[in-house]
Amino acid sequence: MSDFADVNYGVEAGVARLAVNRPDKLNAYRDRTADELRAALARAEADPSVKAVLLTGEGRAFGAGYDLSTIDPNATPALDDVLQIHFNPLVEAMRRSRLPIVAAVNGPCAGAAVGIALAADIVLAGRSTYFYEPFVGIALVPDAGNTLFLSRMLGRVRASGMMLLGDRIDAARALDWGLLWEVVDDERLQPRASEICAKLAGLDGDAVAATKRLIANAADFGAAEQLALERDLQGEAGRTPAMKQRIAAFFARQKS
């Protein structure tokens, strides 16, 4: 039973299910969402019965990125602090966790949610899923590990196109590009994720944790430095007049 506001948490048969629960916002992340996901992961890690984690979103979206409605359009947001305090610690905790994390990406996955999904160990998606990097379009820079994961998983050319142009990348292309382990029919996504988690939960926990550590050491070299650079450059972007204009235009579109 969950006692979080933004995250549903439950444990069954050795698998902890963490589901962002803001479906009315398409599971857009606010600061509290990131904090609660990290707290839920810590709870799972402290529970010796938990052997694997399933990360997903309730409703029809995995996550619509950062909830821009939490930004005061009349103030200068300290986005570097947002990353330093809330989002970077979540990404780092996922990569350090002893537990294998399976991300079941359902529907839209945008902005920060992309980085959080890719911080998981195994990522699968429903056929209707798409990935979207809106940052540059609103005068910001990719964060939450996006520049780290996308650049290393896709290579410079594809990562550049995805992050600079902001085109939607559908599940089939994401699979072809190597962002995903599997794509399944939407109605099979949660059952298939549960099957994978059950298999992981049946493996030796020490071997899984050690393998995760080896993979992270090989794949995430310099991750802390990259997350810090994302933080610093996002802080600078968040203080520019262009960003305020783009955010104001975003709110205007939402009202129209």
Image: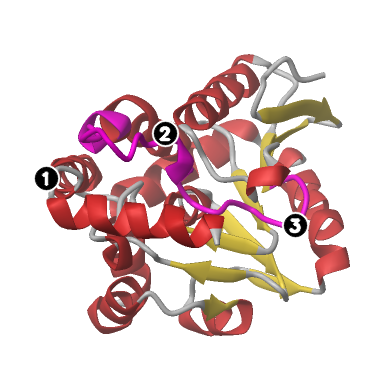
The three-letter amino acid code for the residue at tag 3 is: Arg
Asked whether residue 102 is drawn in magenta, I would say no
In the rendered image, which residue does mark 2 sit on?
96
Work out whether residue 33 can be spotted.
Answer: yes
**Span colored in magenta:** 57-82
The local secondary structure at tag 2 comes to helix
Whole-percent x, y for residue 81 in the image: 24, 28
In the rendered image, which residue does mark 1 sit on?
236
Q: Badges 1 and 3: C-beta atoms under 8 Å apart?
A: no
Q: Is residue 219 left or right of residue 102?
A: left
The three-letter amino acid code for the residue at tag 1 is: Glu
Residue 127 vertical position relative to residue 192 in the rendered view, above or below? below
Q: As rendered, which of 139 and 174 lies closer to the eye?
A: 139
Q: As rendered, which of 41 and 253 lies closer to the eye?
A: 253
Q: Which colour style is shown?
A: secondary structure
In this figure, what is the number of numbered marks?
3
Instruction: Compute the Cα span from label 1 to label 2.
Output: 28 Å
Q: Badges 2 and 3: C-beta atoms under 8 Å apart?
A: no
Q: Quadrant of residue 8?
A: top right
Q: Which quadrant is home to the C terminus?
A: bottom right
Whole-percent x, y for residue 74 in the image: 27, 36
The local secondary structure at tag 3 comes to loop
Q: As rendered, which of 5 and 14 lies closer to the eye?
A: 5
Q: Badges 1 and 2: C-beta atoms under 8 Å apart?
A: no
Residue 169 vertical position relative to residue 105 in the rendered view, above or below? below
Q: Earlier in the sequence, mark 2 or mark 3?
A: 3
Instruction: Compute the Cα span from label 1 to label 3.
Output: 33 Å
Categorize mark 3 by other alpha carbons within 10 Å: few (<14), some (14-19), many (20+): some
Q: Earlier in the sequence, mark 1 or mark 3?
A: 3
Categorize mark 2 by other alpha carbons within 10 Å: few (<14), some (14-19), many (20+): few
Q: Is residue 176 left or right of residue 19?
A: left
